[in-house]
Amino acid sequence: MEQLAIADEAYVHHEPTSFISRYIWSQDHKVIAIQYGMTAIAVGLVALVLSGLMRLQLGFPHSFDFISPSAYYQFITMHGMIMVIYLLTALLLGGFGNYLIPLMIGARDMVFPYLNMLSFWFYLVSVLVLMASFFVPGGSSGAGWTLYPPQAILPGTPGQDWGIILMLVSLAIFIIAFTMGGLNYVTTVLQARTRGMTLMRMPLTVWGIFVATILGLLAFPALFVSALMMMLDQTLGTSFFMPALLSQGEVLDHEGGSPILFQHLFWFFGHPEVYIVALPAFGIVSDLISTHARKNIFGYRMMVWAILAIGVLSFIVWAHHMYVSGMHPYFGFFFAVTTLIIAVPTAIKVYNWVLTLWQGNIHLTVPMLFAIGFIFTFVNGGLTGLFLGNVVVDLPLSDTYFVVGHFHMVMGVSPVLVLFGAIYHWFPKITGRMLNDTLGKWHFWLTFLGTYAIYLPMHYLGILGVPRRYYANLSTDFIPESAQDMNVGITIAALFVAVVQIVFLINLVWSLRHGKKADGNPWGATSLEWQTPETPPAHGNWGPRLPVVYRWAYDYSVPGASRDFIPQTVPGKEGREAEGESQP
Amino acid sequence: MNIIVLFMVAVMAIFVWWVVLQRVTAKTWLEQGVDVDPREADNSGYTPYVAGKLALWVFLVVITSLFLLFVTAYHMRMHLGDWRPLPDPGALWFSTSLLVVASIALQGARYAIVRGQWRLLHSAYAAGGVFALAFLAAQYWVWQQLSDAGYLVASNPANSFFYLLTGLHGVHLLGGLVVWARGGAKLLAGESPRSLRLTVESCSVYWHYLLLLWLGLFALLLRT
């Protein structure tokens, strides 16, 4: 019996012909993915520049007139918020989720293309609103990316009148955009898989994005709730979060509100958010490692179960961000235990990546370099997470650079390395041309070593007790002068790494025109997106007939097969009959 | 936070349980062919109708998460000392009854579309939307009454939550009304009622859901 995937009907429609319907108001998941990706990268570059400015101030305090204390806090806030939400979440889910889900499960498009288009435009509006906050009176919010009340909306905090409102509005719009996209991803994965594509045959990339989307759908409402209630506190003078307080000699109208309530809501979103970013990265890195090591992923089922376990556990660890806010010791104990437990499925994944590499036919291509680099930075950041997950260790370290080092390693550098790897890996499919290999290798090594030069010393500064969030580290009794030398070193490394990204941008632009032409499957990969009839895939992805899936996504180096990979679309027992025909 | 944690864990548990039913223990590296796909046997799914329904249900879970987070915040804020409960406005019983009627009417429209009774469909579908609009008007009227009586949004957290929860519930109903109006326009334009089955059924499910949600919120407001 011939089954039709729902997206099959889209093929009946005519391909959009005008420039506008094709590239601007596009409902094609591939174009929307590129729109998402380019917007995210553009706004990410803004955040990168902000981090450079912050490092300039920290390395060379009092040398730059335009970096006032207010400006510094605005840079911190915008850098954090942009990187976590508008770059990582948007690029991994909106960008790669959009591009890869339909192609990897063998669908022609997302189930609701119109909703998908709306999702991007809402995202773009949220970015524009956020960028607008740089230009309003008082500037953008300087409350820190966690936006803790009461200080976020009190006089004295930069951007407490307009900046914070635009920030909250922008977040609300982003959440609406995410919900539209997320409904699409979940429904598409559940409904539009092609024949033979069972859930357990999906590449781990799709699993990671799928579970991360579910986490996002459940967790983003918590951010929405906290943003909405803070907005009312700010505009209408309600007291959800605002306690009675004296501000600059004046008694404010608020009374009785609970800043802790905000922290609970914020981190109830904030911790799942870590995994919203991490799970797609885990999935992608699994596929990169397996493909470029020419070996099936070690423990596929265990990898899926680990993704699910992490998804469930991520909802019961949030208060480990709040140890310093004070809590009942039993709660602290509970959250420390759950935090350590979530390290178990995470460690399973790390072991499985390493065991996939073990005795693999490792090709040190650029995507593979980034994937292996990810394993290093992720293990580093994960191990310091074990320190911080314990209450007694967290308390002295929480307000120091140790935390900055930890989360940049685990949540900043690690997913960004995966993103780079993913771009180098899928660029040939997206554009039909390879990225330049030499530039790519320079980009990898300078970025990888450079980020270590930035973040490893920060752990040391943290153990010395250098506080984070400070505008300038002046001399104190307990911090030696040499700490400032280290700060200078970190700043130089940070600026260097930021400049190195120009190599990447040049590579992107240059290869678009002049890169080596890629055939449909340059890496010899098994999953469906590499089996499209055209590269880049045309509108509708698959030509007249949808692909049919006969095997799992990791048939690499199968004994007896003629090539070292068997695509998912090849029928036959272990692919030998079909493969054998081409042999002499 | 207990409420929301229980909800999240329940949702994730249901999801994991569902995944476990999907041959999660299959050794997919050992098996080839399409016959292992359970969908080969029942030949179900794969229609815009099912996809639309599924997306609606996922969306309802998201809204539930949103409102349960508010309820969680409500509980935490309630016990902080300065909470002065609102008087229970009797008019809320009236607006509740309007929403019940709207929900019943859309159920009638759903009944009509399955049985091909087009006249009943038209009137019941129209009634569903009109009564929902009446509900919104009644809610607004309650707001007016309360603010005239001096219960302003910022004067007490109980008031703030009342306006916030009723307002947000109303916004969700408004969103439903947009879908309802678009369906109604198609119905008036003479499109085949059969093609509107998904719209009618989705509206009815959404209306029932918002009624249940409202009953839950109303009970919370009455009890505290």
Image (spheres, coloured by chain):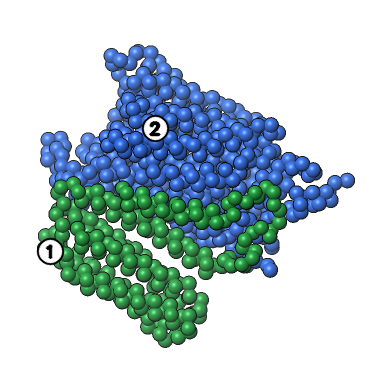
Chain colours: A blue, B green
Residue drawn at (17%, 66%) of the image:
B89
**Most distant residue in the right direction:** A584
Against B202, residue B9 (above or below) is: above
Q: The residue under label 1 is which amino acid type?
A: Asp
Q: Residue A492's x, y, as percent? A: 46, 22
Dot 1: chain letter = B
Q: Secondary structure at mark 1?
A: helix
The residue tagged with tag 2: helix, strand or loop?
Answer: helix
The residue depicted at 37 percent of the width and 30 percent of the height is A390
From where the camera sits, is residue A184 visible?
A: yes
Q: What x and y, as percent, mark residue A313?
A: 43, 44
Q: Which residue is mark 1?
A: B148
Q: Nearer the viewer, residue B136 or A447?
A: B136
From the top left corner, tell me how far across and down residue A187 is, in percent.
51, 59
Quarter occupied by residue B213: bottom left
* Three-letter amino acid code of the residue under disc 2: Gly
Q: Are marks 1 and 2 on the same chain?
A: no
For residue A303, side relative to residue A45 (left or right): right
| Relative to A190, B150 lies left or right | left
Quadrant of the drawing holding the C terminus of chain B: bottom left
Indicate the position of residue A307 as horizontal and vertical percent values: 52, 44
Q: Is residue B191 above or below residue A398?
A: below
Kindly tell me whether residue A509 is visible in this rendering.
no
Look at mark 2 in the image and give the residue it sits on. Answer: A389
Q: Residue at x 36, y 49 (%)?
A: B5
